[in-house]
Amino acid sequence: MTTTDDAPMAAPGAAAPALLEADGVGKYFGSVRALSGVSLSVHPGQVTCVLGDNGAGKSTLIKILSGVFTPDEGEVRVDGAAVKFHSPRDALSAGIATVFQDLAMVPLMAIWRNFFLGSEPTKGWGPWRRFDVEAARRRTREGLAAMGIDLRDPDQPVGTLSGGERQSVAIARAVHFGARVLILDEPTSALGVKQAGVVLRRVAQARERGLGVVFITHNPHHAYPVGDRFVVLNRGRLLGDWAKDEIGREDLVRLMSGGAELDALSHELERIPGLEELAPDPAVAPEEQATAAPSEAVHAAPAEAPRAAPEEDG
Amino acid sequence: MTSADTAVARPDEAGPPPAGPPAADPGAGDGRGGQAGALTRILRRPALGALLGAVAVFVLFTITDSTPQHLWLTQTGFQAWAQQAAFFGIMAVPVGLLMIGGEFDLSTGGMTGFCAIIMALLVGNEHWNAWAAVAVTFAFGAVVGAVNGIVVTRSGLPSFIVTLATYFVFRGLSVGGVLKVNHGSTSIGLTGTDHPGLKSAKDVFGGSFAHSSGLPVGYQTGILWFAGVTVVAVWVLARTRFGNWVFAVGGDADAARKVGVPVRRTKILLFMTTSTAAALVGVISFLQTNTAVSEQGVGYEFYYIIAAVVGGCLLTGGHGSALGAALGACIIGMALQGVIYSGWDSSWDFTFLGAILFLAVAVNTLTYQRAMRARR
Ligand SMILES: Nc1ncnc2c1ncn2[C@@H]1O[C@H](COP(=O)(O)OP(=O)(O)O)[C@@H](O)[C@H]1O
Ligand SMILES: [Mg+2]
């Protein structure tokens, strides 16, 4: 179940080596073991979800995959070959793009200026070398459209977009710049139900385009509809790694809620007068339950959506 | 809120009807048009407030002009305020860029005077070729800016404090240093006009052009420098990678760094731009007047900042316009000269400028907030 051998994975594209693999990686901060012996793999056209409570080590794991940290133990492999990333730039040039929680976008700047920030297309020579503004606008429009995002006005400052739209633009940017693997750190955690649905749709769209996606979340209701594999972390250790047909939504919810641990807690809380309302399944907040339905619908739609991308190989 | 959300990224786009066009073809005529409202687009232009302000101030002084031949509307009036505007604008524009980049430079005013003194010492006392003196003054300006920028970006101290320190250092030098090398006098002037290279340098920096019967003295070349600085700054900001980085480092330096923008380099270059512009103003002022005085330019840093803020540059960085800063300088130029043309006591300058600053900031903040909210 926690094997790093990807052969038994009965998934499309299983013959090819994983796009990106972590094999027994670990990371220490001084004497604090943030992560230890964790493995996962990402295949083209698949979404690997990384689940876990706060402090479980999700961010640490994706920082290893995206080149922010080098692992203290284990190794990272791209296309089956071991790699050592020293910076996010290294990961990026291997086709691994990360959308961090804060998105790395400047709210006051227009969408198209943000889209190409740091990688502006230029034209002209010498002192006349300049930002190809027309190309930037056009390609922003195209890049967004390819991900199914239709913004009326690319001149709109990013700060005026809703949370889901902002995430969508960040994802479209990563895809446009030729990412093969997309790592998303809690892209839905700060969003309402509707906005989370918008983002899950982008995740599905990226998958349809053949990217491998690592989707970090602490919400099983967001993970289940779009995920192909589920990697669950607990206190820096791998709790398990399941393909979708090996685990049901209810199991995932229970796992995430800490299973037995929380059952015990809820018993304990039941005995405290005035806290009865906390007792029934404390892991599933009402808001999260509400999320489940729309995200399932989201999952169904893109499966039959035509591929919008004219340039699939990026 | 929610209706706007769905209008922008519509849920049905991921699963269009089977025979439909590819998902989300932009401009697939669904009647929503491709653009934001015209009003939103105009409000988003940070120079708008300054443009309206400049027109208003111009009209005001056209009405209050109390000169016998209504000189305000003649070349004489134009020359007077344009030259004043140029004097402030050559600095206000780079100060505006720096402000968009999220930093302040309080040493600018003092630097203009100090650079004039360097010119005066090199040409007047040391009898250098004027062009060599110009080159050294520019190099000095660039180095001071680089030091300001490196200290700010390396130390993490607010640029306000770092450049305040620079300002005091040069203010002290411009008094104490000049008294020492100039035998107790705070004014350094040229004796004679036969210094090597002086005439051609004067033609470029301190000369005049477009002499006519209506205006025998012509316009100072400083006006051309002002126009040139403005055009280059507008172009750089709107049409170069560097311009994109200026907005980014002022708007969110962390985000900019993450996507590979060289944040430090961008900021250091901006500091170098303001201090090199200060050298330009120093060179121009010395070559126009043949003299330099201790503490010349002290206090002008606030005029530059006022011009930039009136021009729509956000004090907190990330938003603004070079054209706006230039228009802000024009407003200041008109205000200072208009008060004279109206026959008012020039003590009212400051009150007038304060009122303009307040009005402009109010208008800019309102339009800015509207533009940021507008999601129609
Ligand atoms: N830079 C750091 N220095 C010290 N401890 C850290 C650092 N980053 C994370 N940790 C610790 O590592 C553990 C895992 O954190 P993290 O990966 O952020 O979890 P998650 O993203 O799942 O909430 C936590 O106990 C956290 O305190
Ligand atoms: Mg985290």
Image: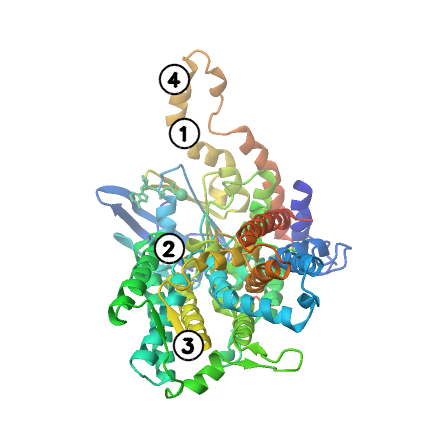
Left or right for B200, reference A294: left
Residue B55: x, y in percent? Answer: 67, 60
From the image, tell me which residue sits under label 4.
A268
Label 3 amino acid?
A: Asn
Residue B24: x, y in percent? Answer: 67, 57
Label 2 amino acid?
A: Ser
Label 1 amino acid?
A: Gly
Task: Say which residue appears at 71% left-offset and 68% top-offset.
Answer: B69
Label 4 amino acid?
A: Glu
| Contact, mark 1 vs mark 3 (Cβ under 8 Å) | no
Q: Nearer the viewer, residue A63 or B211?
A: B211
Q: Nearer the viewer, mark 1 or mark 4?
A: 4
Task: Say which residue appears at 61% left-offset and 80% top-offset.
Answer: B216
| Contact, mark 4 vs mark 3 (Cβ under 8 Å) | no
From the image, tell me which residue sits under label 2.
B159
Say which element carries label 4: helix
